[in-house]
Image (cartoon, grey):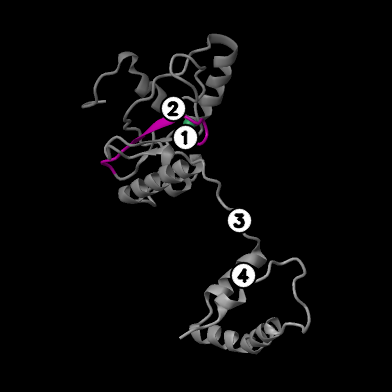
Amino acid sequence: MPGSPARPGGRREHRDAAPPLSHTRRSRMSITAAMPTAKERPRRTRTKRVSHLPAIRLSSLLPSHIDLHDPLKPSLVCRDCGTWVPITGMQSKTQKLVPHHTGRADVAAAIRCRSSNRRIEWDMTIPEWHQALTDAVKEAASRQATTVLPKAFSPATDQTLRARAQRTPAGRLADWNAVLPRVAATDAHRQVAPAGDSPALSRTVPLDKLKITH
Ligand SMILES: [Zn+2]
């Protein structure tokens, strides 16, 4: 492979050259016989191989599972194996996850992840991702606050509140006007004091002080 930096052991070439059928055979072998461990993930690959699985849409992932801080070295959390995997081909036509094993390098067994070489669909710009990440962080922060958030309204209550919010000033005035006669009647009733009823235990009032003098 001219131009590409030589890697010890030529791992990349070996892995990329493997036809899809042999991987089953290889992983079965890895369990029974040799037990090779997971290889370190390459940052970039040049293989033309593309996974038959549908492309991974960025918008379908959590913003915190995508890292576009360095647009030339992006990575994301593979949904199949749950680990960070570099995206290769940033300067070529197709971008995809680098081929990778499912577990930690040199620790886990060398089991090829099915999302190896899977294409990436850029349905999100870097600023959009940044915004989504910021929103998610804010949202998480608000969840950790000690303030108790009000319970969500039931659909019926929600509808009532919406209807109330949509009322016009004219409508509100008409409602008040409709209720005013009843308010006036209630007030009038309150002001009527039954004759002869006076509080039995109240103190006497100094009547002379209440006289208005000019
Ligand atoms: Zn994976």
Residue 159's label in the rendered image is: 4
| Residue corresponding to mark 3 | 152
Picture quadrant where residue 77 is located = top left
Q: Is residue 65 above or below residue 16?
A: below
Q: Amino acid at mark 2?
A: His
Label 4 CB-ligand 1 distance < 8 A: no
Label 1 CB-ligand 1 distance < 8 A: yes
How crowded pointer 3 is (Cα within 10 Å; few <14, some 14-19, many 20+) is rated as few
Q: Is residue 31 above or below residue 117?
A: above
How crowded pointer 4 is (Cα within 10 Å; few <14, some 14-19, many 20+) is rated as few
Under circle 1, the secondary element is loop
Q: Amino acid at mark 4?
A: Gln
Residue positioned 78% across, 78% down in the render: 197
Under circle 3, the secondary element is loop
Which dot, 3 or 1, sits closer to the camera? 3
| Residue corresponding to mark 1 | 78
From the viewer's side, name the closer residue of 144 and 86. Answer: 144
Residue 50 in view, yes or no:
no
| Residue corresponding to mark 2 | 100
**Residue found farthest to the front:** 208
